Image (cartoon, rainbow, N blue to C red):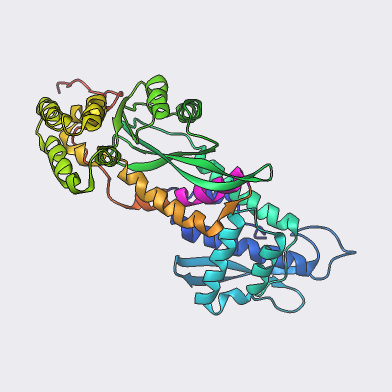
Amino acid sequence: MTTATMALAELAEKGADVDVLRQMVQFMAQRLMELDVEGRCGAAYDEKNPAERLNSRNGYRERTWDARAGSVELKIPKLRQGSYFPEFLEPRRTAEKALTAVIQEAYVQGISTRSVDDLVKSLGMSGVSKSQVSRLCGELDERVNAFLGRQIEGDWPYLWVDATYVKTREAGRIVSVAVIVAVGVNTDGQREVLGLKVGASEAEPFWTEFLRSLNRRGLRGVKLVISDSHEGIKAAAAKVLKATWQRCRVHFMRNALAHAGKTQRRMVSAAIGTVFVQDSADAARAQWRSVADQLRDKFPKLGALMDDAENDVLALMTFPRAHWTQIYSTNPLERLNAEIKRRTNVVGIFPNDASITRLVGAMMMEQNDEWSLNRRYMQLEGLQTLSDTAPTRLSAVAR
């Protein structure tokens, strides 16, 4: 007989080329039907409880649900007495929005059980208990944690790290916590979300522990860490990864222009911009110092900033030129952070750190799958030269 629930291991074995959004819709729809039928029968699947049993299962019938996320294959339970058909399958467009809302609510435990109950009822199902809701969240946590704890294989020469802030409840107070995300590119030019962590601050110990957790999962071969200007990240990258640090050029320009008046910012931006069109590291450094000296008299704080930031902003120029346009800033993470903000703003205030990890972790799973279907993010030119793993060469054999 077909098992009553979709095995999580089966989902995990499908690999990174599966559309996670469609997979999550399928998983949640199947689980909601199973929970609904469990309530109608008065017993769980294969449970021997004749005294309290109200009905019995009678197999499944297959049904394809054409959702916006793609075609979803469902197994609709059948009952021995009466019929069962989940009303959320019709009409599909409205139901899909409602089901997506259930998934989003299930990610976040801060909502009341009654709220989840009302959403399930809106799909034409009977209400589920608090324990059933907890079980659904637990199953989602299992998938997200498996993704965030997976082994990291191969060399990852480039690593982007950044943080955004969301609100959560802590000891009865509303506080802001950092959600840090790490994205890497491996020597095959493929991009992946490598890690996620929620914490109270961006202090050096927090970053150090996060990077060490990536190391424990197998991260190796990091040559350049790209981030905003933060001494905690810089120190942790040097200590844990022994890697060069690239200060995000976009953030640096914002800091630099803050030292100039509004009417002079275009001129300052153009002057500093001449540094970044140079063909070599030596030429860029010479131009940097020339521009700093030109601006120093009129903008002494800007001159001092450029003196301090030279090595960090120009660190990328010792790496393959073909990669410069992608490693000069944290732009890849800025887009991710914007999406995190958009989704978390719907929630407002999270009940705890675990609920943040559930929602953002699921988003990162979806993003990872999308990237896996795209062409490689970075040109292969120069990537192999950054690898710590030398390619195996076989000597020629005379025939």
Viewed as shown, does residue 243 lie left or right of 128?
A: left
- In x, y percent, where is residue 190? 31, 42
Check residue 364 for magenta coloring.
Answer: yes
Residue drawn where x is 54% and y is 65% of the image: 100
Residue 129: image location, x then y, percent: 75, 60
Q: Quarter-wise, where is residue 320 in the image?
A: top left
Q: Is residue 217 left or right of residue 35?
A: left
* Percent coordinates x, y for residue 59 in the rendering: 68, 67
Residue 84 forms part of the magenta stretch: no
Per the picture, the main secondary structure of the magenta-coloured stretch is helix
Closer to us: 396 or 231: 231
x 43%, y 27%: residue: 232
Instruction: From the viewer's side, name the closer residue of 122 and 297.
Output: 297
User: Front-most of 133 and 391?
Assistant: 133
Q: Which residue is more in the foreground, 333 or 259?
A: 259
Q: Position of residue 27 (x, y in %)?
A: 57, 59
Q: Is the residue 358 above or below the residue 38 in the image?
A: above
Residue positioned 10% across, 28% down in the render: 290
For the record, the magenta segment spans 352-366
Q: What residue lies at 49% left-to-right and 42% top-to-bottom? A: 179
Figure quadrant of the N terminus: bottom right
Check the image and report above or below for 157 versus 361.
above
